[in-house]
Image: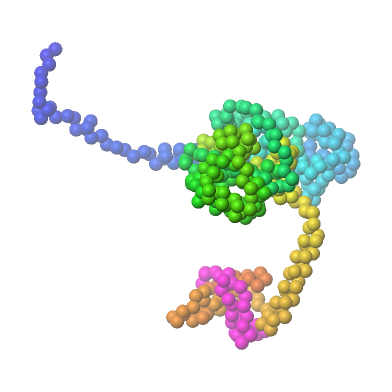
Amino acid sequence: MTVIYRPGHDNPADYLIRHPIHLPPSDREQKVAEEYISYILSTSTPKSMTIEEVAMETAKDKTLTAVIQALLTNKWYGIDDDVDKPTFQTLHANRAELSLAHNDSIVLKGRRIVLPKTLQSRAAQIAHTGHQGIVKSTALLREKVWFKNMQALVEENIRNCHTCQISTHKPAREPLQMSPLPAAPWTEVSADFGHLQNGKYLLVVTDEYSRYVVVDILDSISTTSVIPRLDKIFAEFGVPVYLKTDNGPPFNSSDFKDYASLTGFKHRKITPLWPQTNAETERFMRTVKKSIKAALIKGRSWKQELFKFLLDYRTTPHCTTGVPSASVLFGRTIKNRLPHLITPIAGDPSIRERDTQAKTTMKQHTDRKTYVKPNDLRVGDTVTIKNDHTSKALTPYQPNLMTVTKKKGSMITATHEGNYKKCHLFQENSKTTNKTHTQPTRLLFI
């Protein structure tokens, strides 16, 4: 073989190789891929569960239908062959705790709703929405609902959760809680920061009595950023007696010292970089970071998933107190996405009595004024609407007459040539002729 040198200007390259045609991706392929991703996201998120849905599925469940019939007739024998006998026998053994609710369409075991077979798996998925562990997911379910073999279903659901498998931290024992319990809720709180991979920070404030957790998102941990967020938290929950921190920045600044003195709480400092001294907040930080990782893995909004996690965490019985932290702090049961029966709170009759008295007094005082009188405006009447903004170029009222299409209290809906406006009724005596309805009744536009 003989090699011959040839100058570049005498050896032109293949033009098609050097200049390929860049074809855009197929619209059909891209659409199919987007539809598949949308399907995966929609099917992997369990929908919330309502009381009406529980009642509808209970009516289809032959076992619970037999239980309802037995409770109504007090006859627990002669059941059909297609009834789940282990579940029926378990409920029969606990019949003293059973009752009916929602027009005898739902079975209660104590205060908990007995779920039909078709909703049990979805309830387990809802309880695991925030990617809590087996103990807390089961505790969240047991706070609201009951069904047989709940623990096994939750364990199977979490074992098959791919997101938990790839984001769970190496198992470790929780540190012992050696601090004495404070005298009352929100008297002693602890604060700490969590740094996220996207550059954001989480300010976590934990009530050491109820274990209620408040989380705020920060762009920085400077004093000028942290103090307004603490003011916001204290405005919602009150100023604590003690605030415990690790004495790192910005808690070790003179500005924060002045802020504590001005606000009226005592700053209790613990050893920096020693998580055991602030174990409650540190343990929660690890759990919340796992929830954020799970959201990022699934391509969802980590802020939205964080708020869902907080709802589940606050309404789950705490492993130490055995009571949901929100119930301890607020003195009532907080509704989450699981079915929930509303129960009256303590002191409700006196609150309702004072509310009725105050509203009656307000109405009597207002109705004594000379310009207050009832109206007889009806659907179909013609009205004019006051202009929202007046100027020299505009008349006080719009020139187009409108027709009343709906009336609810003092609110009316009027239309003119397809344009709808919602207004608050305001009659002027000189312009009102409701008895004959020959003159438009004037209205104040809102």
Foreground pick, 149 / 37: 149
The residue at 62%/83% (across/down) is 428
Task: Please identify the quarter of the rendering in which residue 183 is found.
Answer: top right
* Side (left or right) of 224 relative to 62: left
Locate residue 120, reporting x and y percent.
70, 37
Locate residue 56, reporting x and y percent.
72, 46
Foreground pick, 397 / 133: 133
Task: Please identify the quarter of the rendering in which residue 409 is found.
Answer: bottom right
Q: How is the image coloured?
A: rainbow
The residue at 74%/69% (across/down) is 359
Locate residue 293, reporting x and y percent.
53, 36
The residue at 67%/49% (across/down) is 241
Foreground pick, 128 / 378: 128
Residue 184 colored in magenta in the image: no
Foreground pick, 52 / 156: 156
Locate residue 404, reporting x and y percent.
60, 74
Task: Please identify the quarter of the rendering in which residue 146 is found.
Answer: top right
Q: Give the range drawn in magenta.
A: 417-446
* Side (left or right) of 335 relative to 444: right
Residue 438 colored in magenta in the image: yes
236 relative to 15, above or below:
below
